[in-house]
Amino acid sequence: MQSVDLAPQELRTLVAVADEGGFSAAGARLGSTQSAVSHAVRGIERKLGVVLFERGRYGARPTPAGARAVAHARRVLRMLEVMVAETRGAGTGEAGTAVVGGPLRIAAFRSAALYLLPPVLERLAVSHPGIEPTVRVVREIGPGTAGEVAEGRADLGIATVGTGSPVPPGLVGDVLLEEPYALVHPAGHPAPRSLPLVDWAENCSSYTRAWWAAQDWIPAATVRAEDDGAVLSMVGSGFGMAIMPRLSLTGAPPSVEVTDLGARRPTRTVGYVTTPELAATTAVRALVRELRAERKPQVSAV
């Protein structure tokens, strides 16, 4: 197979076109012109021997091959940034240790971002003050947080993993904690299992759904909410009951009551995912160490 060399600027062009949805907007972002960006993309397509973008009146959209190329481009560009940061930081600390700084991009689903990450990032700031973490909340539906990592938009994702949702091919990761589900209902209600079910789209896994299907007392959801916080609010207001994982119940208001579902209750496995190349970097390794130290979040009444 013939070797193909792509310069970093060519990779930035691919990413800009994909992010901006067109050659003109990509040119503005890159400080170039529409014609120069279009010419550059055609040159990249000739090198790779494949069409990367569908052109149309509404802009440019990556083809399946283009989407793969853009994901690789993001990851390569990120590793170039890491190379510079780690090279400059090598041997600059006490006793020749490395001092690493720069951005660390984290994708997390809502309850992990709210309740799992804050103490982790607080400790990370003490041990590695030069690291600048940013957290983006991503709905754990479809590709979810793992998809953000695979596509090069995040360095590490806090994801639901396990037999129902294994680590996607091409990524690496590990389990951080297994959290039980519990029945949540209005405080003091005499018959909570008779209430309508309040649910939200992210509250699903093949294992959990199979458990639910075997419980004849659980009705089909008749009330839907946007996220787990809205579910708690609706349950506390008397709209129904819900079945929720431990992280989502952190700081549950006094208007709700949490009841254990017993020894055969379903669980949700939470872990982290990253790319093989980023797994070896100082910043990601430091974050993983702090995440592993936070395996058992303290949640009351579950």
Image (tube, rainbow, N blue to C red):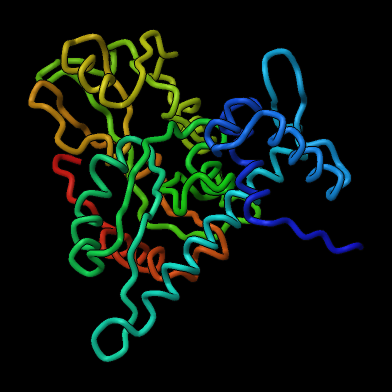
In this rendering, the answer to whether 228 lies above or below 291 is above
Residue 34 seen in this snapshot: yes
Relative depth, front residue between 293 and 13? 13
Toward the right, the furthest residue is 1
Residue at 68% x, 57% y: name it. Answer: 7
Toward the bottom, the furthest residue is 95
Q: Position of residue 192 (x, y in %)?
A: 23, 18
Q: Position of residue 212 (x, y in %)?
A: 45, 28
Residue at 15% x, 15% y: name it. Answer: 190
In this rendering, the answer to whether 260 lies above or below 156 is above
Residue at 33% x, 65% y: name it. Answer: 101
In which quadrant of the rendered view does residue 246 lie? top left
The total number of labels drawn is: 0
Q: Position of residue 155 (x, y in %)?
A: 46, 53
Q: Quadrant of the C terminus?
A: top left
Q: Position of residue 74 (x, y in %)?
A: 58, 49
- Lateral position of residue 201 relative to residue 291, left or right: right
Residue 262 seen in this snapshot: no
Q: Quadrant of the N terminus?
A: bottom right
Relative depth, front residue between 257 and 102? 102
- Lateral position of residue 100 relative to residue 256, left or right: right
